[in-house]
Image (cartoon, rainbow, N blue to C red):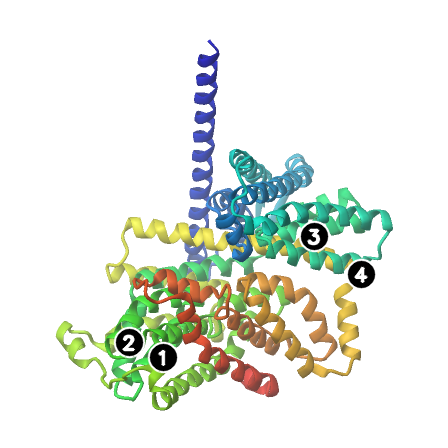
């Protein structure tokens, strides 16, 4: 009888788990389709406004509210798939050397995530009830209104589901907690998993009892968030947790809980944040349409006659591809499969081929339209169109510096570059009927549509993203590169990438609110302004810090952590925020090529079909391009006019 009860309990538990998994999949599907539908809504508004002089009412409100709902519909799936960004250096070592200790640490992380989302739901619940009772709406009465309580309800429900998913992960880690901690050498790392949570709790209690000054609390929370990130806590969770704890110490538990809810409700509920999913969608459609391959073949025909011309063609193709995607990781993945095999076949060393591909891929985050520039513009509250315009000259300058560097290395360091051959690939193109002009036409079309629309005043950046995504989808369909399975894969990946970024922004908002209350950013700005270092001295230290952080963190996380501290300093020193944005993006992108994380390097490694090429070889091959990027950054620091000339 006891066995029957056990079997019944196990069956019920399995059925509940299966039902919960199906719920998460359904929510994620609804969220990604909601994101995708925004493309058509915005495009319909563009057509209605420009062709028929009849815009669709309420598009701004619908899009803004949709972003919040879509994020919380998809967030549980992202947590389940472990897509939430984290630094893997220490936690990866722990997982391999001390599995039981890793399980304890993952349990602590899951418990923190569960608690934070329970508090988010609790904080958002009163606002949901109030909006339901009062029939709160967004828009203008008599023109267009949309009821907001369903959106607030999705937020509360989504937060509860995320909390349950963290609770499920906590339960899943339990069986491993009693196992051996592994090798003797792993014990110092294993002890850290116990010491760090206890130390965090102890120092919060000490600060509470000691009545620390707000600036001291801010300093301690900055140290805490960096320590937690280094130890493998998901970056967004670390930002939320330290922001929440800081607010508890600065104000009280109620204010901290309500701030979590306010950040979830209001941070990304702005029309401009729709640029994130729309430009990601455009980049992924471009990816599946093989435009990158066509751009490379056209560049190969153009530059192949030069000594080192295939390397120059790789740079040129990356620059062109950057002008229609804005995501450097996409460039790294695509050109690893396109350019690296061809370069090796024509005599280039594998080390140089992968290093050049890694180096030139960073153009994707500088040459507009750039996703990182969009995020910077939103955080710094400066014109995204102005940032795009300011990035044109630096982008061309960096691409030219890469190309010149390739030619010089081909002449001066043949042992590093390889047995370079000349040739434009004309024979292969003639054999399969490739026409460079036809091949490059979709690229030109997208560049003219997106950038021409923004600079010509036809589109806002958000509308340009929607128009570009729709055009890229049409191109993929015309080229017969897009079927239903690929379409679903594209929109699902769009949703996940967008949710990761937007959730990071939400989490960073909580942390930023806490820092603002401490007045620490203003104090740092005043202190640095009075040291006499000047703008160049501050930028030198700032650039060094960006590179160091880039060794362990991703680009978006660095932006969200650093900008609340750096922007007041730039204002105090009289710097231009648009120019500062260009410097920041290049500095962050250098980190994509530096060990131990070097995200672009890891993407290239995972995209390679050749196990003989190690991570060390890729890092070594990309090092000359890190130096070139540093030189260009210093040039832009010394001559700000290079970034601002097109804005005058």
What is the residue that sits farthest to the front in this orientation? 184
Residue 144 relative to residue 406: left or right: right
Q: At 36% from the left edge and 74% from the top edge, which residue is drawn? A: 351
Q: Nearer the viewer, mark 2 or mark 1?
A: 2
The one nearer the camera, 150 or 637, is 637
Residue 43 location, quadrant: bottom left
The tag earlier along the polypeptide, 4 or 3, is 4
Q: Which residue is mark 2?
A: 343
- Front-lying residue, 388 or 588: 588
- In this rendering, position of residue 47 left or right of residue 515: left
Query: Which residue is disc 1 drawn over?
Result: 316
Residue 139 spot, x, y in % from top left? 60, 50
The residue where tag 3 is placed is 243
Check the image and report above or below for 179 versus 248.
above
Near mark 3 (Cα within 10 A), the count class, few <14, some 14-19 or many ≥20, is many
Judged from the image, the secondary structure of the residue bearing numbered disc 3 is helix
In space, the residues marked 2 and 4 are separated at their CA atoms by: 54 Å
Q: Pick whichever of labels 4 and 1 is earlier in the sequence.
A: 4
* Few, some or many residues within 10 Å of mark 2 (<14, 14–19, 20+): many
Q: Who comes first in sequence, dot 2 or dot 1? A: 1
Q: Are marks 2 and 4 in contact (CB under 8 Å)?
A: no
State the separation of the CA atoms marked 4 and 1. Answer: 48 Å
Q: Secondary structure at mark 2?
A: helix
Q: CA distance from mark 2 to mark 3?
A: 48 Å
- Which label's residue is closer to the chain start, 2 or 3? 3
Q: CA distance from mark 3 to mark 1?
A: 43 Å
> Is residue 61 something that shows in the picture?
no
**Disc 4 or disc 1, which is closer to the eye?**
4
> Which residue lies under the disc numbered 4?
215
């Amino acid at each position: 009888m006891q066995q029957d009860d056990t079997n019944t309990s196990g069956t019920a538990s399995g059925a509940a788990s299966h039902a919960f998994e199906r719920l998460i999949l359904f929510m994620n599907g609804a969220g990604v389709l909601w994101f995708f539908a925004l493309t058509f809504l915005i495009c319909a508004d563009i057509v209605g406004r420009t062709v028929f002089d009849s815009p669709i009412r309420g598009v701004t409100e619908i899009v803004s509210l949709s972003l919040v709902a879509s994020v919380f519909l998809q967030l549980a799936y992202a947590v389940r798939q472990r897509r939430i960004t984290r630094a893997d250096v220490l936690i990866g070592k722990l997982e391999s050397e001390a599995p039981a200790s890793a399980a304890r640490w993952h349990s602590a992380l899951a418990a923190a995530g569960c608690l934070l989302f329970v508090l988010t739901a609790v904080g958002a619940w009163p606002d949901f009830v109030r909006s339901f009772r009062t029939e709160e709406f967004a828009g203008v009465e008599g023109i267009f209104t949309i009821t907001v309580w369903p959106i607030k309800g999705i937020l509360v429900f989504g937060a509860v589901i995320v909390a349950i998913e963290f609770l499920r992960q906590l339960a899943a880690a339990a069986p491993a907690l009693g196992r051996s901690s592994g090798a003797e050498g792993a014990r110092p790392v294993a002890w850290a998993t116990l010491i760090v949570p206890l130390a965090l709790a102890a120092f919060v209690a000490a600060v509470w009892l000691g009545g620390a000054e707000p600036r001291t609390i801010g300093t301690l929370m900055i140290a805490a968030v960096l320590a937690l990130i280094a130890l493998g806590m998901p970056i967004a969770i670390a930002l939320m947790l330290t922001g929440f704890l800081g607010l508890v110490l600065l104000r009280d538990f109620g204010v901290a809980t309500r701030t979590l809810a306010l950040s979830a409700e209001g941070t990304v509920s702005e029309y401009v944040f729709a640029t994130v999913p729309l430009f990601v969608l455009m980049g992924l459609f471009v990816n599946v349409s093989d435009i990158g391959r066509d751009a490379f073949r056209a560049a190969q025909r153009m530059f192949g006659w030069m000594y080192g011309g295939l390397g120059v063609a790789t740079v040129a193709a990356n620059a062109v591809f950057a002008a229609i995607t804005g995501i450097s990781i996409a460039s790294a993945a695509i050109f690893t499969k396109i350019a690296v095999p061809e370069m090796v076949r024509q005599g280039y060393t594998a080390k140089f081929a992968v290093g050049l591909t890694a180096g030139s891929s960073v153009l994707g985050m500088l040459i507009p339209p750039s996703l990182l520039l969009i995020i910077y513009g939103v955080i710094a509250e400066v014109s995204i169109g102005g940032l795009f315009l300011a990035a044109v000259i630096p982008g061309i300058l960096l691409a030219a510096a890469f190309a010149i560097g390739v030619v010089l290395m081909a002449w001066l360091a043949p042992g590093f570059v390889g047995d370079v051959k000349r040739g434009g690939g004309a024979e292969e193109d003639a054999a399969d009927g490739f026409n460079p002009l036809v091949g490059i036409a979709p690229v030109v079309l997208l560049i003219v549509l997106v950038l021409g629309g923004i600079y010509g005043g036809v589109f806002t950046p958000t509308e340009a993203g929607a128009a570009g995504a729709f055009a890229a989808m049409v191109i993929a369909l015309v080229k017969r590169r897009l079927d239903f399975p690929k379409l679903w894969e594209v929109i699902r990946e769009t949703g996940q990438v967008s949710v990761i970024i937007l959730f990071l922004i939400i989490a960073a908002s909580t942390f930023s609110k806490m820092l603002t209350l401490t007045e620490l950013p203003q104090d740092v700005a005043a202190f640095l302004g009075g040291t006499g270092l000047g703008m160049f001295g501050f930028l030198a230290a700032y650039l060094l810090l960006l590179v160091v952080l880039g060794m362990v963190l991703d680009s978006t996380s660095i932006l969200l952590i650093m900008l609340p501290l750096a922007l007041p300093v730039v204002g105090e020193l009289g710097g231009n925020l648009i120019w500062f944005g260009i410097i920041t993006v290049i500095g962050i992108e250098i980190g994509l090529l530096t060990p131990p994380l070097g995200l672009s390097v890891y993407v290239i490694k995972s995209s390679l079909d050749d196990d003989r090429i190690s991570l060390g070889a890729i890092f070594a091959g990309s090092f000359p391009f890190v130096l070139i990027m540093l030189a260009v950054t210093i040039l832009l620091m010394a001559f700000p006019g290079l970034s601002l000339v097109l804005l005058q």
